[in-house]
Image: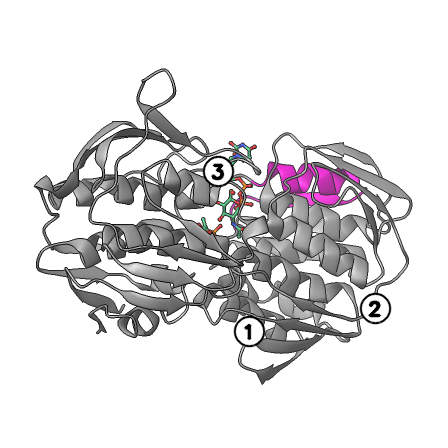
Amino acid sequence: MSSFIIEGGCSLKGEITPQGAKNEALQVICATLLTQEEVIIENVPDILDVNNLIALLSDMGAEVKKLDSGSYSFKAEKINLAYTQSKDFMEKSAAMRGSIMIVGPLLARFGEAVVPKPGGDKIGRRRLDTHFNGIMKLGAELIFNEQKQLFTLSAKKLNGQYILLDEASVTGTANLLMAAVLAEGETIIYNAACEPYVEQLSRMLVSMGAKIEGIGSNRLTIHGVSSLSGCRHRLLPDMIEIGSFIGMAAMTASELTIKDSSITHLGIIPESFRRLGIIVEQRGDDLYIPQQDNYTIESFIDGSILTIADAPWPGLTPDLLSVLLVVATKAEGCVLIHQKMFESRLFFVDKLIDMGAQIILCDPHRATVIGMGKRFRLKGMTMTSPDIRAGISLLIAAMSAEGVSTIHNIDQIDRGYQNIDKRLNALGAKIERR
Ligand SMILES: CC(=O)N[C@H]1[C@@H](OP(=O)(O)OP(=O)(O)OC[C@H]2O[C@@H](n3ccc(=O)[nH]c3=O)[C@H](O)[C@@H]2O)O[C@H](CO)[C@@H](O)[C@@H]1O
Ligand SMILES: C=C(OP(=O)(O)O)C(=O)O
């Protein structure tokens, strides 16, 4: 396992271009399985999770070509379903969350799919009921082998249905959408997740010939078609990476321009950082963060302590709460961070507390941060990254800290951030990979 050695106290200056969106990439790469024709995807991030999924599709028999940096051609003309029963497939697909989204396309196109319980961040219970209940409603049969933790699905035919999701699951919505586009008749997915990832997937499916209404809303109506064709699709910039850069600029008192941010797709992300007192200027489609020595957390209008909580889109994505939390440690003022969706994502605060941050972990979902402003600087130390977003937050903390820090298990960061050390070093950071 590699580590980062970070020399704290270096501020950054310059421009950075966000990578393509990880969570969109995982969806649309799975969608290439829906057609035997060629699909070209552009702006694909060079990150572990995405590279592993691309390798998995290739092992399944899809023809994958790298056209140039960030562009790939996929042609899933022949898929070796027998491979999906192999130990190799089980091990590889169990290593990431995104692999669960091969179920919808495989079932829709071939009438069968096998998938082990997927991996991804250990950030709490991550059930799959929304996926499987919806898929069964479309007519599939599910067998769960508890001992092997294996889900086997089969369906002679999928039939359109009204599906009211029990929760607006992001990957669940994507999976059902990909199954429904090739089902017979009309499917309505209500309480659908409507993150830009799902909107983008919907647009890509439409360009492949799918019939989808209500794109971008929480009620998707799909009229099944008998086959889909190839297309060309470009990923949006990664909104979580953009948020991470805003937080990083604030914590390291850096002047940063985040290029081509597709601001209309960021929802309330910029505003959430502004509520912590950070200046985030819109310049065309770039975000400009001026150098700020200090920033002050807002209170609610009635004077009470600000709460920042996650919520299904267009609410605040849970993937940025760890970054917002770390950024608050250096602000003036107080904020309650409420992570409603995941119950194990806040435990990394013990590392920030060891670095000197003033945080009360009220319970697994809530942490109160008492910002220390310029009165105290975090101290560098050795730590291990428990998950992708805690990982980037610890990196941000280490970059702003006094002295040298070491972060182990940086595979967790590489899972979602492309060449992060090189890109930040080019702006003035001092991060060594060992
Ligand atoms: C590969 C991928 O795309 N991963 C993202 C996806 O994961 P993923 O699709 O796995 O997450 P889900 O949207 O299914 O839900 C995540 C968790 O939130 C809870 N939940 C969900 C919806 C809801 O309305 N209320 C609620 O409490 C669920 O019970 C679950 O524990 O969405 C998550 C939630 O945005 C993000 O953190 C992940 O980065
Ligand atoms: C939780 C995340 O990823 P995954 O769903 O792949 O574990 C994330 O991207 O923050």
Indicate which label's residue lies in the foreground, 2 or 3. 3
Looking at the picture, does residue 45 appear above or below residue 213? below
Question: Quick one: label 2, few (<14), some, or many (20+) residues within 10 Å?
Answer: some
The residue to which callout 1 is attached is 55
Relative to 186, say whether 34 is above or below.
Answer: below
Point out residue 219 in the picture as x, y percentages from the top left corner. 74, 36
Tag of residue 186: none
Relative side of 113 to 310, left or right = right
Taking the spot 62% from the left edge, 70% from the top edge, the residue there is 57
Q: Which is more N-terminal, label 1 or label 3?
A: 1
Q: CA distance from mark 1 to mark 2?
A: 22 Å
Amino acid type shown at disc 1 = Ala
Q: Tell which of 316 and 389 is nearer to you.
A: 316
Instruction: Tell which tag, 1 or 2, sits nearer the viewer.
Output: 2
Name the residue at 11% across, 47% down.
Answer: 377
Under mark 3, the amino acid is Leu
Label 2 belongs to which residue? Answer: 229
Separation (CA) of disc 2 from disc 3? 35 Å
- x and y percentages locating residue 241 in the rendered image: 43, 57
Q: Amino acid at mark 2?
A: Ser
Of residues 332 and 168, the one drawn nearer to the viewer in this rendering: 332
Q: Which residues are magenta?
A: 128-148
Q: Which residue is mark 3?
A: 316
Residue 216 in view, yes or no:
yes
Q: Nearer the viewer, residue 85 or 23?
A: 23
Q: Earlier in the sequence, mark 2 or mark 3?
A: 2
Does mark 3 have its CB less than 8 Å from ligand 1?
Answer: no
**In the image, is residue 149 part of the stretch drawn in magenta?**
no
Which image quadrant for residue 61? bottom right
Quarter of the rendering occupied by the N terminus: bottom left
Mark 1 crowd level (few <14, some 14–19, many ≥20, 10 Å Cα):
some
Residue 184 percent coordinates (x, y): 90, 48
